[in-house]
Image (cartoon, rainbow, N blue to C red):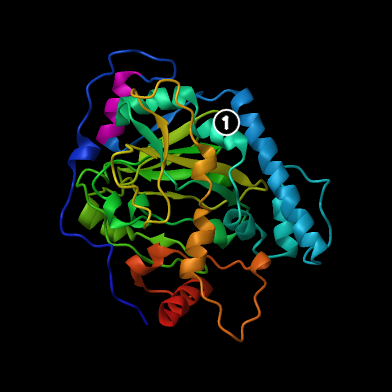
Amino acid sequence: MADKPVSGLVDKAVPEPFNTLPPPVKEKKPGQLPYSEIKKFFEEGYIVVRDFFTREELEPCKRDIEVMVEELAQKLYNAGKVKSLYKEYGLFQRLTRLEEDFQGANILLFKYQKMPPSFRALWSNERMLNLLEQILGPEIAGHPTWNLRTKTPRSEAVNIPWHQDSAYMSNESYDHMIATAWIPFLDAVPENGCMQMAKNGHKSGKVAVHSCCQGPTWYIMLDEEEMEKTLGVNLEDDVKVEPVEFGGFILFHNLTPHRSLPNVSNDVRWSVDLRWQSPSSNFGFYGIQEGILMRSPRQQNLKPNWEEFFKVDRKAVWQKRHLHVEGDEEVDPDFDTRITGPWIGKWEIVNHNVHTRAFKAMQAAA
């Protein structure tokens, strides 16, 4: 049975921030794209940027992911959850081996991840901020939503359906652009679950009706019929599969419909998504966390205040607010693979699972 209150719906459309092409920047800086690419970004809702990051910029990220997997393996092994540490497997297979012994290992790594220094360097990369100036202007803040995607092969838990990012955020995010870079740590191709994008789905300035939650996951869903009807997406002409080679990324925003394809390869498709917006706009994060200032013409040689930003553990906060454990349930929080969050309460729940039940239990307890 569906649960209906839908707070994500708003009557007002705001197309201007997503369709109005800014003038060319006056000063050309390293990393900036031809103006034709910026024009395409505003016209179609996304662009694929190729050969942007150097191997020296991305390899430290891969090494830090290896550290995260090692820490998870030790935690699972010491608790008797897995048969082996699987040290003989590399970055692109080890998490899959852990997942075979303990279903939900990929969820645990997603749920409890902390941002290492290499990811911070990528997020505040000078050339990336130069590029973002072409879209957002000279004042740029990092948005608190970032994710390392643990896309193991043939796992329903990491198959993300069609959605617009603002459907996960609070309604205050609907009236301004939040730019996203989706950065893979290997060549992303259809077989390992690259992205599928729907161009032109942003033109109306609307966030369409989503529902919750897909299969056994915590992901909200955007039906293709709704994409056609409300967002004006032509499913035949506008939907594109977008492979991205290592070193490139997809740049899109909070109103761009997108999803990832299933991973049917033998490798974990590691990627990170990072976001930025104007610091003068609401971060649309339910009052959990503000953004982090990364660039301002009023503060020359600005360094992001990481210490202050990471005083808030966003995932811990929203699990505390939105995850309820019944008194007779025996759940070890270190190995709890349920994920909830405020987005579940925004949309009609059409499919109940362990994630939605935990969310509803918290609502009832409140």
Residue 225 is situated, as x and y percent measured from the top left of the image, at 28, 60
Q: Quadrant of residue 198?
A: top left
What is the secondary structure assignment of the residue under circle 1?
Answer: loop
From the viewer's side, name the closer residue of 23 and 39: 23
Q: Quadrant of residue 7?
A: bottom left
Residue flagged by tag 1: what amino acid is it?
Phe
Q: Is residue 170 magenta?
A: no
Residue 170 is situated, as x and y percent measured from the top left of the image, at 32, 57
Q: Quadrant of residue 271?
A: top right
The secondary structure making up most of the magenta span is helix
278 on left or right of 9: right
Q: Is residue 35 magenta?
A: yes
Q: Which residue lies at the image location 55% right of the left edge and 28% below the top edge?
A: 247
Q: Is residue 267 above or below residue 128?
A: below
Residue 40 is situated, as x and y percent measured from the top left of the image, at 29, 29
Residue 173 is situated, as x and y percent measured from the top left of the image, at 30, 50
Whether residue 187 is visible: no
From the viewer's side, name the closer residue of 144 and 261: 144
Q: Which residues are magenta?
A: 34-43
Question: Residue at label 1?
Answer: 246
